[in-house]
Image (cartoon, rainbow, N blue to C red):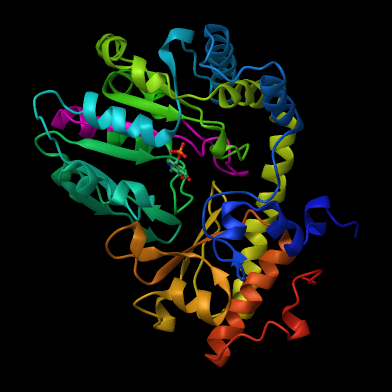
Amino acid sequence: MVAHPFDLLTVDQLRQSGSLKWSAYPDSLGAWVAEMDFGTAPGVIEAAQETLAHGLTGYAPNYLVADMQEATAHWLQQRFSWSLEREQIRPLNSVISAFEAALFHFSPTHRPNAPIVLLTPAYMPFVVAGSRFGRASIEVALRQGPTGWDLDWVALERALQGGALLVLVNPHNPLGKVYTREELTKISELVEQTGSRVFSDEIHAPLVFTGATHISYATVNDAAAQHSITAFAATKAFNIPGLKCAQLVLTNEEDREVWSAVGGVPEHAAANVGLAATTAAYSTGAGWLDGIIDYLDGSRLLLGELISEHLPQAEYQPPQGTYLGWVDISRLNLLPSPAEFFLTEAQVSLVDGSACGKGSDGFVRLNFATPRPVLAGIIHRMGAAVDGCDKFDASDPEFATQNPVY
Ligand SMILES: Cc1ncc(COP(=O)(O)O)c(C=O)c1O
């Protein structure tokens, strides 16, 4: 079998890259923060370099923004059959800034300080948003069913009563769930009935595997378009979150009026390299992305095989999208912090489920966007640490990570 080029990347090379994932915990194998180990598309690198070569180190010229709006509109049309006016697509530096815009400007107008409703487990910054911004936060836990993760409709309806800001992350981080049209439609009905609003975070939308289809929330019906604001970015699919560019999509005319008064300052924070890189990603990166999705598709299944073999006490359903695995290790009794256990005993860095909201203590989030041999090394190490409950021996050749076999 011919090795995939990504399989040949070594741990030493990854460490030398100096990325956050590989430098924060210097001796561990990095499977925590949502970065991929595969660089980015060649056109993206070229565009970012050209921006600097042209001396565009000042504020964003209008044409860089216009190019990004044009490329995003084309991408959304091609990928998700969503037709938008260029002006509906606004530049920001990050999806978290888009969330803050939703919180401050697009919460239900009849209920100042409306609570934030999260579908948990949830992406960590959303879990702490309530306390950061002095808002009540209601967690509605998704439930594991025989075919995947299901919404608790009764609890959701209760949480939205009186009007709330629902944070809908689709595809879901950390579950990798891709919501169906039926689910999105039902959500839109509850949101409409309760006078709530939706912040639809679709940052992972391009990273969906065979068998699932991403549907943008605002496209399910007119009510959804009116009561939601959407955030997109090329940053996860093309691995460029450090370049600081995201897109806020406004599909409600009144929101656009509000934004025209308050949006100038946050829009100013989008970076020139990020704008140019996003334009390049959306207009020239589809082929590169297809290769990434193909590799990740194999890796999400490989992760299941590795877990069955080396960590049989754990449970894992391959995600429908994203490159994040949500692994139930509750049977191992590693509380209070399984991530701490694996960091010290296996030298593997993960995210604790407890960071994703209540009831997730027995889980860890594992980033599998890494070379498959490294993924194998990660699970070998975790299994060995659990079996021995002993210090992981990095010198043991079985766990060598230079060229591990899987
Ligand atoms: C669901 C989700 N939203 C937002 C973000 C953060 O995006 P940004 O860096 O653009 O704020 C991430 C990062 O992983 C994410 O997974």
Q: Position of residue 121 (x, y in %)?
A: 35, 56
Ligand 1 is found in the corner quadrant, namely top left
Q: Which residues are magenta?
A: 188-215
Image-based side of 124 in relation to 339, left or right: left
21 or 165: nearer the viewer: 21
Residue 246 in view (yes/no): yes
| Magenta stretch encompasses residue 30 | no
Tell me if residue 237 comes above or below residue 1 in the rendering: above
Image-based side of 73 in relation to 49, left or right: left
Q: Position of residue 35 (x, y in %)?
A: 58, 49
| Magenta stretch encompasses residue 190 | yes
At a point 29% along the width and 51% down the height, the residue shown is 127
Instruction: Work out which quarter of the rendered image holds the N terminus and state it.
Output: bottom right
At a point 57% along the width and 51% down the height, the residue shown is 323
Image-based side of 135 in relation to 230, left or right: left
Instruction: Work out which quarter of the rendered image holds the C terminus and state it.
Output: bottom right
Q: Position of residue 157 (x, y in %)?
A: 17, 43
Farthest right residue in view: 2
Tell me if residue 181 comes above or below residue 158 in the rendering: above
280 or 326: nearer the viewer: 280
At a point 72% along the width and 61% down the height, the residue shown is 372
At a point 26% along the width and 23% down the height, the residue shown is 227
Image-based side of 234 in relation to 337, left or right: right
Q: Which of the 4 image quarters holds residue 356?
A: bottom left
Q: Number of labelled discs?
A: 0
Q: Position of residue 397 (x, y in %)?
A: 78, 83
219 or 37: nearer the viewer: 37
Q: Which of the 4 image quarters holds residue 248?
A: top left
Residue 329 in view (yes/no): no
